[in-house]
Image (cartoon, coloured by chain):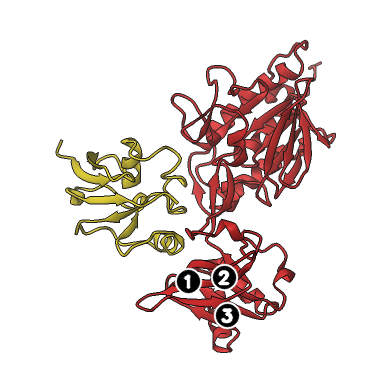
Amino acid sequence: MIETDVLIIGAGPTGLFTVFEAGLLKLHCHLIDALPQPGGQCSEIYPKKPIYDIPAYPEILAGDLTEKLLEQGKQFQPGFTLGERAETIKKQEDGSFIITTNKGTKHKAPVVAIAGGLGSFEPRKPKIENLSKFEDCGVEYMIKEPELYRNKDVVIAGGGDSALDWSIFLTDVAKSVTLIHRRNEFRGALDSVEKVQELKNLGKINLITPAEVKGILGDDHVTGVVVEQKDKEPFILDTDHFIPLFGLAPKLGPIGKWGLEIEKNAIKVDNALDYQTNIPGIYAIGDVNTYPGKLKLILCGFHEATLMCQSAYKRIFPDKKYVMKYTTVGGVQGFDGTKKEAPKAVVKAIE
Amino acid sequence: MEQDVTIKIKDRDGVIHEVVAPTDMAMNLMEVVRSYELAPEGTIGICGGMAMCASCQCYVNSSHELSEMTDDEDAMLAEAFDVQENSRLGCQIQITSALEGLEVELAPES
């Protein structure tokens, strides 16, 4: 069981800045994120895009912002559970919460800060009638164990980097690899496109374009897919696995079933006070929340995180007196023993 | 106002809305849809207008000359669902005076 003061769900910019603000109050943080790396959208979707409205940065790349936020919070030694999605929450008798991920990792904290942004990123699923029936029975949305495809027939659908890269990779593993894309053109890295072309010429990849998978065949496991090609009759392609790779889309996911008040696909909070939800001890900050006048901006998430931490401190230590200190006055004392403070002026008397 | 254009937008329930969109506010079509609340919040413009999701995909049903598709938009539509010949991403269509009378239909939510 991982125990901490503030359990942050979501390791995007708002979640990462919460680590720093909580650290100033001597509160330890642990972050959970479904993505395999911190940064949320900034690292997953647009790391190379410039952002222009981060205070004091006329321009900063989203990926660089993530790095700087990690650096800023590093001294407060946050813990991370990455590549796992927060699934369930249970309130304990002492008022604390236990949050369990989809992989069974348990976390306990008196305060939960949901900084989930747009939600957890989940594979975009094509509209095929019986798709869900075959999930994990021959239909996979991401390749976790390539050995699963050893000596099997595999059909991959998609036209981006993932579809290209995995098609290339699986030629050394699978019995056959078929890549199906709705267009003739692929939108991936040039060398990947060229490699697929080369493997097609060698007969190692069966390329079917422009085409779409419209149906899946099988009883309790995939045995084939129905392929529709423009101006041709649909045909059946025998296969053991169908892997649709159409990128990721954000969904609120399990958090939406935690009993929180949801409005317009976001979590309703008390913005007049501390961004607390309808469940005391659970806060929602950043893009995941909603209140009158809400703006989904990173800088607003930073502000919300700051106020939330003050409230979290009072909740954890109701009897302690605390006065907010400027970092220019009190400096920053990390949990790792580091201390940052302004150099003291040397006073020397004139004799 | 002279700076406004009238656009017909068919929502996902098939209802046609005739809306007035300003040309002097640097708005795009996705933002117009959101400002008139023609699709539930959280189902359109998810990426904020960076051509990184297809939640604002629409079908252009009039013969207006639109700005050329960028690589980013083209790439996104290559991965999107329910794509037709007349598909565009609303976030990539800037509102200009040339769009007077534009007719579009919102693609299904995916």
Q: Nearer the viewer, mark 1 or mark 3?
A: 1
In the rendered structure, the answer to whether residue A325 lies left or right of residue B19 reads right
Q: Amino acid at mark 2?
A: Ile
**Label 3 Cα neighbours within 10 Å, binned few <14 / some 14-19 / many ≥20:** some
* Mark 2 burial class by Cα count in 10 Å: few <14, some 14-19, many 20+: many
Q: Amino acid at mark 1?
A: His
Going from N to C along the chain, the mark reached first, 1 or 3, is 1
**Residue at the outermost front position:** A219
Q: Are marks 2 and 3 on the same chain?
A: yes
Relative height, residue A216 to residue A317 (above, below): below
Q: Colour of chain B?
A: yellow
Q: In terms of sequence position, does the residue under pointer 2 or pointer 3 come before the other?
A: 2
Query: What's the residue type where badge 3 is placed?
Result: Lys
The answer to which of marks 2 and 1 sits earlier in the sequence is 2
User: Could you tell me which secondary element the residue under label 3 belongs to?
Assistant: helix
Q: Which chain is indicated by disc 1?
A: A
Q: Are marks 2 and 1 on the same chain?
A: yes
Q: At 66% across and 75% down in the image, what residue appears?
A: A170
Query: Label 1, on which residue?
Result: A181
Please, what secondary structure does the residue beneath circle 1 have?
loop
Count of residue discs: 3
Q: Chain of mark 3?
A: A
Quarter of the image for residue A206 reads bottom right
Looking at the image, residue A106 lies above or below residue A333:
below
Q: What's the residue at 70%, 41% (across, down)?
A: A32
Q: What tint does the image give chain A?
A: red
Q: Position of residue A232 (x, y in %)?
A: 38, 79
- Residue A45: % across, % down: 54, 52
Residue A195's disc is: 3
Q: Which residue is mark 2?
A: A156
